[in-house]
Amino acid sequence: MRPAGTLGGRLSPTEMVAHTLVVERPEGLLLVDTGFGRGDVADPKRLGQPFRAMVRPALDPGETVHAQLLGLGLDPADVTDVVLTHLDLDHAGGLSDFPTARVHVHEAELAAATAPTLREKARYLPVQWAHGPQWVTHTTAGESWMGLPAVSALPGASGSAGEVLLVPLHGHSRGHCGVAVSTPDGWLLHAGDSYFHTSEKQTPPAPPVGLKVYQRILAADDGLRRANQARLREMYAAHAGEVTVFSAHDASELAALA
């Protein structure tokens, strides 16, 4: 994505991404978010002119998760589960490319997407899930991960490679979550849109001013978003050696992990 009006990067980054994650598990493949899908590439108009004009997504068929799985020698038909940070249109676009997968999401987010307020309607695109996914909803229920509330998104022994947790980081959207995945080398936390710029993991955060304003405008509850972002910074400072944290849209974080 190459957003408009960045002033050469002074106002906001000149390039942003839709960072997804594929987890190889004995029972099949699991995706964390899906970015834009083949349906979005085939019919860009469905994303809406305001979104396309502001965000300017490349919509390259080769960058869809479906195409990239094939490029890795993996079969898209082996995707059994998708875990979503949230249902914004740049995160859920590929759902229809994996029509038989179980789709895990926080119950508050599915409620927002399927019965949005007038303000929420612009962020969700029901055509992206018109195929009727097998929704699996989750709610926060007492568990803790690195000092943050969490809920197991899939069965798995605690600490085992491939354990997947939803970590509620509400505010950007009504039911926004991070997704934590255990690996033999430590934890990965896909923090979704809980922050947009890598500096926001640090104290004090120093995002470009335009990106700072953009996050406030997009937030369903900006006070809650900022509070959860602060809690995320505290967790990162305390557990940086144990957890690799990345967001959905920072291009430098994707490049570092690639």
Image (cartoon, grey):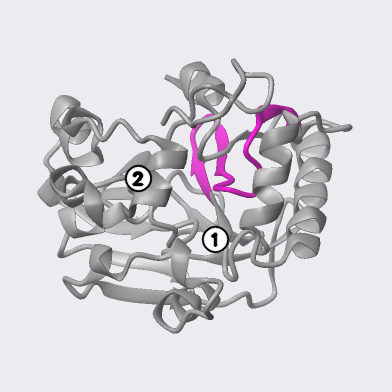
Taking 74 as reference, is 252 above or below it?
above
Image-based side of 21 in relation to 201, left or right: left
Taking 238 as reference, is 91 above or below it?
below
Residue 137 at x, y percent in the picture: 43, 77
Element marked by disc 2: loop
Q: Quadrant of the N terminus?
A: top left
- Determine which quarter of the picture holds residue 134: bottom left
Q: Residue at horizontal 54%, vertical 77%? A: 108
Looking at the rendering, the stretch of residues picked out in magenta corresponds to 180-199
Other residues around mark 1 within 10 Å, as few (<14) / some (14–19) / many (≥20): many
The tag on residue 226 is none
Residue positioned most to the right: 204
Taking 217 as reference, is 121 above or below it?
below
Observer-nearest of 16 and 200: 16
What amino acid does circle 2 point to? Gly
Residue 159 at x, y percent in the picture: 56, 49
Q: Residue at horizontal 42%, vertical 64%? A: 154
Other residues around mark 2 within 10 Å, as few (<14) / some (14–19) / many (≥20): many
What amino acid does circle 1 point to? Leu
- Determine which quarter of the picture holds residue 96: bottom left
Disc 1 from disc 2: Cα separation: 18 Å
Image-based side of 250 in relation to 60, left or right: right
Residue 84 at x, y percent in the picture: 43, 58
Residue 97 at x, y percent in the picture: 16, 53
The tag on residue 35 is 2
Which is more foreground, mark 1 or mark 2?
2
Q: Which residue is mark 1?
A: 166
- Check if residue 104 falls in the magenta segment: no
Q: Is residue 90 visible?
A: no
Q: Residue at horizontal 19%, vertical 42%? A: 41
